[in-house]
Amino acid sequence: MTKAEEYLGEVLAAFDFGEPVVGAVRFGQGHINDTFVVHTQPADRCCRRFILQRMSPAAFKRPDQLMENVIGVTEYLGREIESHGGDREREALRVIRPRSGQPYYADRDGGAWRVYPFVEDTVCYQTAETPALFAASGRAFGRFQRLLQDYPAQTLYETIPRFHDTEDRLAKLKAAAAADRLGRAAECRKDISFILEREADCSVALQALRDGVLPLRVTHNDTKLNNVLMDSASGEGVCIIDLDTVMPGLAINDFGDSIRFGANHSAEDETDLSKVNLDISLFEIYTQAFLEGAGGTLTEKEIEYLPWGAKLMTLECGIRFLTDYLEGDVYFHISREKQNLDRCRTQCKLVGDMEAHWDELMAIVKKYQ
């Protein structure tokens, strides 16, 4: 029995679900938090469900700060959605506080727990099975930017400090390569060189932020398709979930992470790099949809820098995979030897593909500006 199951009964009693709880079972495919779906049985209607999560103490050291971010953003989103005539209960998460009134419940072992109502009649996809689905996620994440455009981003905590600080990520890679604790640097010489040749690129977005060219915004920082709940009937994005990494950041990074994840057809650890290619048509589909959802929120410079967001998020991810490989695979879970090295190489291949098509990417962005 895991810690989560051990405390489940205690935790369920700490929340008021409004109706008798008839069961709670593991749910979803997440690898960070422990997630359960709680079933209750109202007397006069069908079963009502809730999502119960134990936040990962390894990933998130300050659940108080994390939940302050989540509550602030979800309550703000709710008000904005209602003011635009939307359905607050379906289009934004709502935190249900424990009976104590605190932002979360702490079990006897210090584990932090939270509850959201289950958003019914939605689907969570792991991959973009169709271009239309990818576009729907783009509109949803663009709308997320639009709804939060006036939220004071500087008031949010950094739940993972320096998460998208590409300069810092590069410095950590250099340190890992120099230390070469496991003697792996020799086989990675070409991979390290590829990244070091792009050292100046690692400062492009951060320098634009420092210079005031790009504004600080509320960003999601994990804009994969499976963090959008899709309406079962329409196929459109209904609700953005997994707000643990909502922090101050750059809108181009949210855009770029989606492109890194969705605008290619290969596995993240593909060993045959001939199969790893940027799909220009998917880049265009997502760009159009993201800007449509953003509805004029982004500045001209932000739109101009969107290709940089795609390149830098991909390069940064490659840096992180390679650093972890050199340090002994201590952060990213692996199921086989050299998996993190292969992950690094797929990201670097995508970066090279973006560079080869850079003029096309810039033209696409200008087309929808």
Image (cartoon, rainbow, N blue to C red):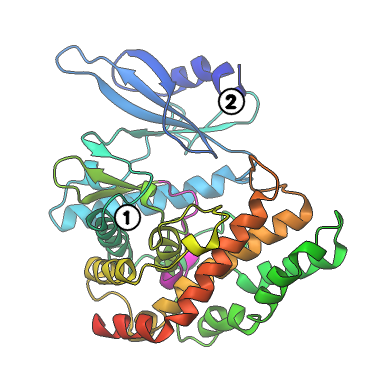
Q: Quadrant of the N terminus?
A: top right
Q: Residue at left 47%, top 32%? A: 53
Q: Residue at left 32%, top 55%? A: 76
User: x%, y% of residue 153?
Assistant: 44, 66
Residue 48 horizontal side relative to residue 30, left or right: left
Q: Which residue is mark 1?
A: 76
How far separated are the C-alphas under marks 1 and 2?
Answer: 28 Å
Q: Is residue 231 above or below residue 318?
A: above
- Between residue 48 and residue 25, name the one nearer to us: 25
At mark 1, the secondary structure is helix
User: x%, y% of residue 21?
Assistant: 35, 14
Q: Is residue 234 above or below residue 174?
A: above
- Between residue 219 and residue 273, name the one nearer to us: 273
Q: Amino acid at mark 2?
A: Asp
Q: Amino acid at mark 1?
A: Tyr
Residue 149 horizontal side relative to residue 66, left or right: left
At mark 2, the secondary structure is loop
Q: Which residue is mark 2?
A: 107
Residue 64 horizontal side relative to residue 369, left or right: right
Assess whether residue 110 is covered by the magenta stretch.
Answer: no
Q: Residue at left 38%, top 54%? A: 73
Assess whether residue 244 is covered by the magenta stretch.
Answer: yes
